[in-house]
Image (spheres, rainbow, N blue to C red):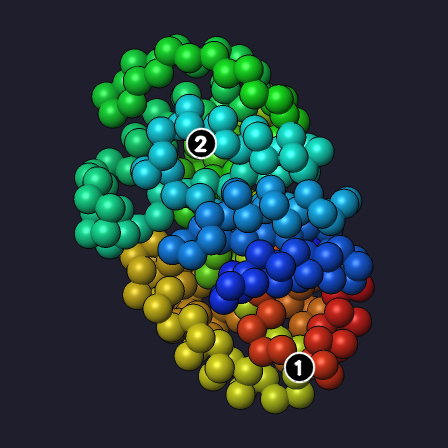
């Protein structure tokens, strides 16, 4: 199981400099990848192109870019440009986002989201693989060929939690990016569905990228309580709520990876045994002592 780093978006006028420094520190610490979200601050792809081009070696991923606000051909062009700037180190994670964002904030319809993602991939995937996209769907159309460099070597992952999305992740994409999804749910729901879909489609074994909050500490109860505060909002979003319910978790605090070195190591082993290929650590309580213990546990 590869271990990546989830970077909370830096704030302030020097946000890009802070991001560059955090990616560089992650690379020096031995992380195989670094991931950022695309929410309402930095544009994730642009930020990775600017900062990641200054830090060699480490894979850089989006977790995730919402699909609805960008036509798939426009996203393909941007992602390929970023991949070229990063010398082929981009992992493009895309997702539906949530109804409250897409309908209430952006003003798009959110009906039949799995149909939207299937049609989106029907345009996006040929383009990022250097092929022409010719597609006329119910919600999307495209007849375009790109000449952007960087095609052919960029994994495309989708934020897939529900059965239809997991089928798409294995059948069409290169795997899935998870959040707020614990080992029981990975083992019993995510891994079997996405792996079988890939096998049936004759595709390589999919990546299962699992991001979770992490804190190495001797006071696990306090760390879980803090996770419950920091990540409370995710427990109210329907897609994550469904995964927490599958896990038997009352809220985000119950899927946070917390405890001393041995306890955290055991939880990471459980994720690997469940089928996770890439664990992405979201360290949410930072101080020098905890960070040293955190890195010692991971590496």
Rendered position, 119 above or below 219: above
Q: Earlier in the sequence, mark 2 or mark 1?
A: 2
- Residue under pointer 1: 287
The residue lying at 71 percent from left, 47 percent from top is 54
Q: Quadrant of residue 199?
A: top right
Rendered position, 119 above or below 30: above
- Residue under pointer 2: 75
The kind of secondary structure element at disc 2 is helix
The label shown at residue 154 is none
Rendered position, 279 above or below 229: above
The residue lying at 57 percent from left, 30 percent from top is 81
Is 149 situated left or right of 57 in this image?
A: left
Residue 140, position in %: x, y?
A: 29, 23
Distance Cα–Cα, label 2 vs label 1: 37 Å
Residue 98 visible in rendering: yes
Residue 273, position in %: x, y?
A: 66, 54
Residue 12, position in %: x, y?
A: 49, 66
The kind of secondary structure element at disc 1 is loop
Q: Hey, which residue is sitting farthest front in the picture? A: 13
Q: Nearer the viewer, residue 56 or 219?
A: 56
């Amino acid at each position: 199981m590869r271990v990546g780093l989830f970077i909370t978006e830096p704030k302030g006028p020097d946000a890009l400099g802070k991001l560059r420094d955090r990616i560089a520190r992650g690379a020096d610490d031995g992380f195989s990848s670094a991931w950022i979200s695309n929410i309402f601050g930095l544009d994730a792809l642009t930020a990775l192109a600017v900062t990641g081009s200054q830090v060699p070696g480490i894979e850089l991923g989006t977790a995730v870019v919402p699909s609805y606000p960008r036509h798939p051909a426009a996203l393909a062009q941007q992602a390929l440009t970023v991949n070229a700037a990063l010398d082929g180190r981009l992992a493009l994670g895309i997702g539906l986002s949530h109804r409250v964002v897409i309908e209430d904030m952006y003003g798009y319809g959110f009906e039949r989201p799995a149909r939207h993602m299937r049609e989106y991939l029907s345009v996006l995937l040929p383009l990022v693989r250097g092929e022409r996209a010719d597609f006329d769907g119910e919600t999307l159309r495209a007849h375009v060929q790109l000449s952007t460099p960087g095609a052919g070597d960029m994994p495309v992952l989708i934020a897939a939690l529900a059965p239809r999305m997991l089928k798409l992740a294995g059948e069409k994409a290169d795997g899935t990016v998870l959040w707020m999804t614990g080992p029981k749910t990975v083992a019993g729901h995510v891994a079997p569905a996405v792996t079988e879909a890939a096998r049936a489609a004759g595709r390589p074994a999919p990546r299962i990228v699992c991001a979770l909050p992490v804190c190495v500490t001797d006071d696990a109860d306090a760390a879980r309580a803090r996770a419950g505060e920091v990540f409370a909002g995710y427990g109210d979003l329907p897609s994550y709520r469904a995964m927490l319910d599958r896990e038997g978790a009352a809220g985000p605090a119950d899927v946070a990876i917390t405890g001393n070195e041995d306890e955290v190591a055991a939880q990471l082993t459980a994720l690997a045994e469940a089928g996770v290929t890439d664990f992405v650590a979201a360290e949410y309580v930072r101080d020098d002592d905890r960070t040293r213990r955190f890195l010692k546990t991971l590496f």
